[in-house]
Each structure stands twice: as structure tokens, then as C-alpha cells.
Image: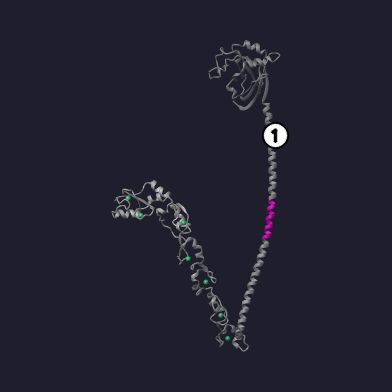
Amino acid sequence: MTSVEAVVAVTLSSSDAVDTHAAEEFACPQCLQIVSDPFSANCAGCHMFCRPCGESLLDGNLPCPSCREGFTHLGHPPAQVTKLLETMRWHCVHRDTGCSFIGRRKELTNHLRMECKKQIVTCNFPECGVKLKREELGIHKNSCRYRPVLCDFCRKSISFAAEEKHLEDCVGYPVECPNMCGEKPARGKMDHHLARECLEALVRCPVETCGVLMLPRKELEGHVTDPEATSEHISWMLKELGRLGEERDILSKEVEELRSDLDTRLVEKRNMQTEMLRLRDEEQKRTADVDSAHREAEMRIQRLEKANEELREQLQREREKDARTVIVRFSDFEARSLVAKGGEEMESTDFDFQGSRFFLRLQPDAPFTQMPLSSSSSSATTESQEAQPENLKFASLFLCRRDDYRQDLRFSVTVVRGETEKHFRWKNPRSRASWGELCFCLKEELMEAARRTEGKFLELRVRMSADGNLWS
Ligand SMILES: [Zn+2]
Ligand SMILES: [Zn+2]
Ligand SMILES: [Zn+2]
Ligand SMILES: [Zn+2]
Ligand SMILES: [Zn+2]
Ligand SMILES: [Zn+2]
Ligand SMILES: [Zn+2]
């Protein structure tokens, strides 16, 4: 906790300002202090008052002390005026006693509250309340009568001024034994000392029937074992011995019980170890079983994979049995296609596939042509045959069946010594007598391919394979 004087409001006059001339505008004409919560009156000079001053003049119907004019209203000044007041810079109010701080009003308030060495503060030790400059507070606190100190005897925190009074009833403070035994027990332990320890304290002889009732504790032992003592003391001592013997018996019985309990636990521990060993053996055996099951499963998987591989190979062989490649030849192709001008078709000789007969139908001069690239039409093909040049004409090609073939068919046709290779899938051949393409390739490609052979024949490679689906 810091010792501070709460500064509610800083009281400033225009002479505290860095710019004293500007500050005069903000001096209340009534109390001459700088206004903190300014109110402006509607007097001739529109003077600014602090609120209490302005209100008391208004209530008393008194004129403005500056311009001697009466006024009827107090209001908040314009925001720029308030702003100007906030940003104005001030010397510390303790400039006269040596503080050189300069800052805005808000900063000055903080400065005085927290740090100004010349500001008057109060010592905050309870009961002190001394007021002094902040710079003097440190030295004062070290010697303040009300500073807290620890009691040497009971370790409680007390004020320095109250120490003497405290020692009068401090429970840790050593005091003389009232029996003058020479001991000085702590005040709080005196009862214990007198009842159990003090050799001068009067105690009763434990032998109830003894004539001596009270004697100092230091004489008790001698009194009880005195050879001159009465028979009462002897029988008391015998009884006492008997009692001690019983106590010893009880103790040794307890020790015996503890020992047998320990034995039982040792046996239990040994049993537990045996059980753990058995469990570990069992676990190892089970692991071995799992391993062999695992190996067996792996072998079964290998056998299955091998069988699967064999099946796949068999399937491949079956499929190849269902596939066939034939070379189909159209002899004297160029001459025949010149004759075929006008759309006539050529048919190949028959060939077998899966017991059925097939043949190719070729139309070198099909009624479709490729549009010239410069055409503005978006269509790729057109029927306007006559208008197109010879080298853009298409040939059509179809695979045809002679018999009732019923299985789906895949086939490809390749122009030998040419470029074109096309793949077809003929689904449900019973529904169509032929399958192929009207624009199979350019007629020119076929002519070129035929010209490359000695006998001017055209060769097409047809590869056929059954596709599995039967149509009945
Ligand atoms: Zn005022
Ligand atoms: Zn005025
Ligand atoms: Zn200061
Ligand atoms: Zn103090
Ligand atoms: Zn104490
Ligand atoms: Zn004593
Ligand atoms: Zn006695």
C-alpha cells in the first residue's frame, strides 16, 4: 500500500499556466481559479464560471463580477473551448518548492497523485496519520512509532508503540515460576509446568491410604520408596508392578498377532507369484496357437491366389479361342473403284467366325464428304457430293452377317499400309444385318494403300471377338 493523499481536484490559477495570458480566459470571475467544469453565462462578455460560482450568482440574481452585467442563463461552452482547456499545459502546483513537472491538467492530477515528491501525503500506518512531503515518507516510515514489528516471543505482528503493553500478556513471554523452582516457562505454558513438571509444586501421594497427603513433587519418589515407609506403600508398589506386567502381556500379545498377520501375507504373496507365472505360461502358449493359425490362413490364401491365377489364364485361353483375325483383300481396287463411281458397293468374299459367315461391304464413293475447312457451316458432313473435290470423299465400310449370329461382337478394322484403325461394338447382331460406319475413312487413303502394293489390291485387317452376351 502506498501512502497517498487522494487528490480530488487540482486547484489552479492562471499564474500556474505555461501560457498565463491564454489561461486568463479560463479564470472564473468570481473565485479567480481556473474552471475545471466550465459553464458560460450569457453576460455581455460571455464569461466562464465554475459551476458553483455561476449557479450562486444566478440564484442570487447578481451581475457578472467581470463585466458587471446581469445574466439569465448558464450553459456548456462550445467543444473547441473545452478542448483548448484540456490541452493547456501547467506547471506543477509545487513549482515554488522545487518541482519542475509540466503537463496537461489530467497528467498533472496523476503526477500529484502518484509521484510528485513535494506533494503532501499521509503515513498510512494505522493510528499514525502524520502528513508530510512524499520525499520524506521513506525515512519517516522507518522510525514511525506505529510501524509494524514482530514480537520476538510469539511472532505476532504488533505496532512498535504497542510492544511494551503487548509483553504484559504475550503468551510467549517467559515468566518466573510462582513456586520459585528456578524455571521460566512461557506464560502460555505455565499451567502445564505446574501440573506436570514443577519440582516445587505440591502433589498428592498416589497411595490413597498414606497419611502424607501433599508433598513437593521432588520428594515424591523418595517418599514412596522410603525403607521406613508403611506397608501400604509396599502393597501399592506390588499392585503397580502387577499392573505393569499386565500391560506388558497385552503388548506382547499384540506383537504376536502382528507377526502371524505378516506370515499370512507372505504366503498370499507367494501364491500370487505362482499364479502370475502360470498365467504367463498360458499366455505364451496362446500366442503360439495364434501364430500357427495365422500361418495356416496365409497358406490358404496362397492356394486361393494360385487357383485364381489358373482360372484367369484359362479364361484368357477361352477368350482367345473366341477371337479371330482375318485379312480381307479387295483385288484391283483402284480400277474397280473408278467403275464404282456413282455409289456402287463392293463385297468381300465370306469368312468364318464362330461357325457363322461374315463379309465386308465397302462403298468407295459414299454419298458423304468432308466440308472444306473454310466453310462457314458448322456441320462436319454434307450430302452435297457433286460440289466437293475428289480428295475429300469418304468411303463407307460395314461388317455384314450371312447367317443368324446371336452373340455380341467386338471388331476392329485396320487399313493395311494406311493409317485408319477403328473399333466397333456390335450389340445384339440379330437386330441388325450389318454394323460399321458411313464415313470410315477418306477414299484417298484407300487408293494410296492399294497403290503401294504390287498387285494394286486393298487389304483390310479385321479382328473379331465374341463379347459374351447371347441374344436369343
Ligand atoms: Zn469560481
Ligand atoms: Zn461577464
Ligand atoms: Zn510536482
Ligand atoms: Zn507514521
Ligand atoms: Zn508476543
Ligand atoms: Zn516451577
Ligand atoms: Zn505417601
* Ligand 7 - quadrant of the structure image: bottom right
The residue that appears at 60% across and 81% down in the rendered structure is: 240
Q: Which span is picked out in magenta?
A: 272-286
Residue 224 horizontal/vertical position (percent): 60, 85
Q: Nearer the viewer, residue 364 or 30?
A: 30
In the image, is residue 445 above or below residue 62?
Answer: above
Q: Which residue is mark 1?
A: 310
Residue 72 against residue 457 in the figure, above or below: below
Residue that protrudes farthest toward the top in the picture: 339
Q: Nearer the viewer, residue 341 or 78?
A: 78
Side (left or right) of 372 relative to 10? right
- On screen, residue 396 versus residue 280, left or right, reads left
The residue positioned 70% from the left and 34% from the top of the image is 310
The answer to whether one can see residue 14 in this image is: yes
Q: How many marks?
A: 1
> Which x, y percent locates residue 197?
57, 79
Residue 109 percent across, percent down from the top left: 44, 55
User: Considering depth in this image, is 280 or 243 the residue closer to the camera?
Assistant: 243
Per the image, label 1 sits on a secondary structure element best described as: helix
Kindly tell me whether residue 434 is visible in this rendering.
Answer: no
Relative depth, front residue between 122 and 408: 122
Report the side of 249 relative to 72 (left or right).
right
Q: Is residue 149 magenta?
A: no
- Place of residue 241 in the rendered image (x, y in percent of width and height, measured from the top left): 62, 81
**What residue type is disc 1 on?**
Glu
Quadrant including the C terminus? top right
Q: Is residue 297 above or below residue 249?
A: above
Residue 203 higher or lower than 366, as above or below: below
Q: Residue furthest left?
A: 61
Q: Please give the name of the residue rendered at 49% of the width and 71% of the height, measured from the top-left corner.
A: 162
Q: Main secondary structure of the magenta part?
A: helix
Colouring scheme applied when the structure was drawn? one colour
